[in-house]
Structures are given as structure tokens and as C-alpha cells.
């Protein structure tokens, strides 16, 4: 288990964001029932997961630019 | 003193609830769901036939944990030293079976010479914390609080 996985900082942040967003989307947003058809509607989960992913990645990019400005 | 729990106009005080909310008893099945979901990430959903969600949770948590190990992240053992190490242990413990397997196989020694190894340590901790979120979700589905 120590063969060594070399990831760039950004790739590591992307994998982190993807995995965390999947869990957040599933667990923090309830599955809704479509009132017209009576079937399960997973769209709110997908939307919330995509929102979390965008926030994670956006936060990483924003923090990167802030650090770049601080360094100058 | 008999009307100590009443307000001046005779209405019951807010501190005294009108009816006690009865919570359902904690059953062995509920404990089983929690144990299964903790031991194998996603199993709590799979047992309840939430196949897609179960497999997605399993894939996400396994990916984080395995990537963490591959990046030479550190697995914390039980300790009473530094506060961050104690918290790291509890975070790791959330992974359940994955943590027990890694400890049994003596994986996860960490490598301070590699910058990415610190990311690996955080990956492993977050995998455990995400599994705890998944366990709570599986429990809520079981008791009917969620679908």
C-alpha cells in the first residue's frame, strides 16, 4: 500500500472535492418524491452535490489566487 | 408552589412541555444497521436496497481511503498525546472496517519527507468522517426520517 501515488496539489483537491461532494449530495439532501408521478426524484441530490463540488473547487482556486497575491 | 410552572395569566410555562415526545425504542436491528454501515462503507444503504446510493458512497469513501494510503498518509493509533493526534485517531476510526484492516495489515506509517503524504493523512481522516455521515444517513432511512 506504499507504492506511492504522486498527485499534484490541484488533482488532490479535485479528487477530494469529488468524493466529498458525492457523500454530501447523497446524505445531506433528502430524496424527494415527484408529486405528479409519485416516483423518486434524485435531482435535488445531484444539484446539491454539484453545488458542493463547485464550492470546493471554487474555494481552492480563490484561495490559490489569494495566496498568490499575498506572496507578491 | 403548585402553580410554579404557570405564568401570571394561568397558561402553562414554556419550560414545561405539554406532552412529552416519545422517541422510538432503540432496537437490535437499528444497532445492526449502524454496525454494518460503519464496518463497510455504504453497506447501511445497500442493506436497505438503496443500491445506487450505497455503491456511490462505497466508491467515494473507498477511493478516499485508498488514495490516502497510496499517498503514504498516516493511520493514527489510539493515543493520549497531542490533541490533533487524538482527533486524528477518532477521524480514522470512522472508516470502520477499512481502519481495522489497515491497522491489522500495518499500513499507513506516513512519510514526512513527501508533501503529498500529508494530504494522504487528511484523505484518510476525511474518509472516516464521511463514513460517519453515511452511517447517520443510513440510520435516518431505517427509522423513516428520510427516504
Image (spheres, rainbow, N blue to C red):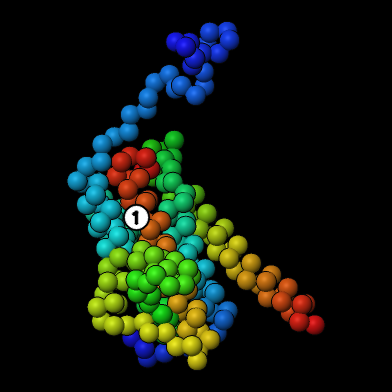
Residue at position x 76%, y 82% in the image: A71
**Residue B12 in view of the camera:** no
Which percent across, then down, holds residue B6? 51, 13
Q: Is residue A64 above or below residue A50?
A: below
In this view of the protein, which residue sits in the foreground, B91 or B39?
B91
**Chain under disc 1:** B
Residue at position x 44%, y 46% in the image: A30
Residue at position x 47%, y 12% in the image: B1
Q: Is residue B79 above or below residue B112?
A: above
Q: Quadrant of the C terminus of chain A?
A: bottom right
Compared across the picture, whether B40 is left or right of A43 comes to left
Give residue B85's quadrant in the image. bottom left
Give residue A55's quadrant in the image. bottom right
Q: Which residue is mark 1?
A: B135
In this view of the protein, which residue sits in the foreground, A24 or A71?
A71
**Residue B72 in view of the camera:** yes
Compared across the picture, whether A57 is left or right of A72 comes to left
Please, which residue is most extreme toward the front here? Answer: B1
Q: Is residue B30 above or below residue B2?
A: below
In this view of the protein, which residue sits in the foreground, B24 or A29?
B24
Which percent across, then down, holds residue A39? 38, 42
Q: Is residue B52 above or below residue B120?
A: above
Which percent across, then down, holds residue B40? 27, 64
Q: Quadrant of the N terminus of chain A?
A: bottom left
In this view of the protein, which residue sits in the foreground, B83 or B44?
B83
Compared across the picture, whether B47 is left or right of A5 comes to left
Residue at position x 35%, y 45% in the image: B140
Q: Secondary structure at mark 1?
A: helix
Amino acid at each position: 500500500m506504499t507504492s506511492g501515488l504522486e498527485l499534484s496539489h490541484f488533482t488532490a483537491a479535485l479528487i477530494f472535492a469529488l468524493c466529498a461532494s458525492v457523500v454530501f449530495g447523497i446524505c445531506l439532501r433528502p430524496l424527494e418524491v415527484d408529486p405528479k408521478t409519485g416516483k423518486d426524484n434524485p435531482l435535488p441530490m445531484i444539484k446539491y452535490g454539484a453545488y458542493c463540488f463547485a464550492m470546493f473547487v471554487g474555494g481552492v482556486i480563490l484561495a490559490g489566487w489569494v495566496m498568490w497575491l499575498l506572496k507578491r | 408552589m403548585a402553580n410554579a410552572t404557570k405564568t401570571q395569566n394561568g397558561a402553562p410555562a414554556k419550560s414545561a412541555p405539554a406532552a412529552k415526545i416519545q422517541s422510538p425504542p432503540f432496537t437490535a436491528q437499528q444497532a445492526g444497521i449502524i454496525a454494518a454501515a460503519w464496518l463497510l462503507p455504504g453497506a447501511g444503504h445497500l442493506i436497505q436496497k438503496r443500491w445506487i446510493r450505497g455503491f456511490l458512497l462505497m466508491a467515494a469513501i473507498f477511493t478516499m481511503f485508498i488514495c490516502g494510503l497510496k499517498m503514504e498518509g498516516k493511520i493514527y493509533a489510539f493515543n493520549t498525546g497531542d490533541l490533533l493526534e487524538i482527533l486524528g485517531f477518532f477521524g480514522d476510526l470512522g472508516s470502520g472496517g477499512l481502519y481495522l484492516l489497515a491497522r491489522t495489515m500495518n499500513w499507513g506509517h506516513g512519510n514526512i519527507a513527501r508533501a503529498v503524504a500529508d494530504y494522504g493523512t487528511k484523505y484518510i481522516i476525511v474518509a472516516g468522517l464521511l463514513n460517519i455521515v453515511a452511517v447517520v444517513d443510513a440510520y435516518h432511512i431505517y427509522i423513516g426520517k428520510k427516504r
